[in-house]
Image (cartoon, rainbow, N blue to C red):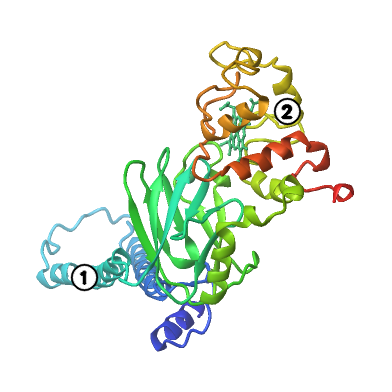
Amino acid sequence: MQTLLAILTAATGLADGPTAPTFWMPQGASTVAPDVDIVFDVINWVCYFFFALIVVAMVAFVWKYRIREREHRFRMDGPTHHAALEATYIIVPLLLSGVIFFFGFRGYLDLATPPANSYDINVTAKKWQWAFTYPNGAVASGAVEGLVVPAGRPVRVVLRADDVLHSFFIPEFRVKRDCVPGRVGAIWFQCDYPTGMDPAKAYNLFCAEYCGTDHSKMLAKVYVLEQAEFDEWLAKQANWIEEIPDAELFTAAGPRLYAQCSQCHSLDGTAGQGPSWQGIFDRIRAGTGKFTNGQSYADLIGPGKVYETPEDYIRDSILNPGKYVVQTFGNVMPTFKGQMSERKIEAVTGMMKHLDQFDAKGKLKAAAK
Ligand code: HEC
Ligand SMILES: [Cu+2]
């Protein structure tokens, strides 16, 4: 019934919000969603129909032609050929698959051809988060801001991968495309239903290609804003870190930046993909730890050494994480070059130095406010 309703609203163009979720599909919130859903529903109903037909016929024939007692004589004079029957089961599936192909291919071409006036957003996938770069240079992180797009106009996302294969998937928009290292792909969508910055209303972005340990954490929210609201967000986004007063730099910006590090670095001593930040600054200053190449922190950090100060080492760990890898950990940290400005690095470093002011989740403790 719901499917039928979805088809009707799609056909009459009456949808004034995302289409309702069905048993199979989440709500449909992009302009292509109704087309995709019709093809899906038609294929689905064709499958139900033939499944029922075949099972009923099978059971009926098994019953009708079962071997009865004392009747072991097989008839050898049955028909061997029936032209009309053969023609039917060639022509009917041919027509059906022809129709499915027509709608499927039309939809495919639609999805493959971004409208000329689309708004470009660069998306980079890396283990295990999304980074979004906007035309004005603003960089947003999937873990923190989510993907923010303007409503009511086509958006073209240009897809890249830094390390391994990922896949950009927004189920509510019915779009999915692989992000392949060494290649630049693109996909487009248009959503006419603004969500505001409300996570409960926002749509979901998943990585749909298993890409390693924390693949399941490679999530982001998709916020759709009215053009004016979007422009305002974008202008702020480009320089939010500059707007924070120096005195509040790490208390205000630290937690927000830490959201990009939290999947791998705990604050409470639990080892994750990366070393916990509990006591990190004192540990680095004391110089006792070792790197996988056998050198110790004391060999590298200090006046006249590779890193003048602990801060310098931390900065380079964020920009060139593969240069010196901490013992017992793998070289899995992505570089934050181009995403972490000096000021942002200063903010996270400040947070590392004052972890006692934050709780285990990276929120500023009430007393410190
Ligand atoms: C995908 C997991 C991952 C993410 C995300 C991540 N890191 Fe790391 N990080 C690691 C691993 C693994 C190491 C240890 C190996 C190495 O030195 O590269 C590490 C090491 C470090 C070190 C050196 C620690 C030490 O004990 O010497 C610093 C500093 C650091 N990360 C900062 C950050 C910051 C800041 C962020 C967020 C902006 C971040 N990391 C995000 C995995 C991650
Ligand atoms: Cu992925």
Number of numbered discs on residues: 2
The numbered mark at residue 330 is none
The furthest residue to the right: 367
Can you tell which quarter of the image residue 346 is in?
Answer: top right
Say what secondary structure mark 2 lies in: helix
Q: Name which residue type carries label 2.
A: Phe
Percent coordinates x, y for residue 322 in the rendering: 50, 27
The answer to which image quadrant residue 324 occupies is: top right
Residue 103 lies left or right of residue 296; in this view the side is left
Q: Is residue 160 visible?
A: yes
Among the 4 quarters of the image, the one containing residue 180: top left
In percent of the image, x 26 and y 71: which residue is there?
A: 106
The residue tagged 2 is: 281
Mark 1: few/some/many CA within 10 Å (<14, 14-19, 20+) = few
Q: Secondary structure at mark 1?
A: helix
- Discs 1/2, front: 2
Q: Is residue 358 above or below residue 326?
A: below
Is 136 on the left-hand or right-hand side of 46? Answer: right
Image position, residue 269 (x, y; %): 75, 30
Q: Residue 98, which numbered label? A: 1
Q: Is residue 178 above or below residue 294?
A: below
The CA span between labels 1 and 2 is 66 Å
Identify residue type, mark 1.
Gly
- Of mark 1 and mark 2, the one earlier in the sequence is 1
Residue 8: x and y, percent?
43, 85
Relative placement, left or right, of 53 versus 248 is left
Q: Residue 73 location, x and y as percent?
A: 22, 54
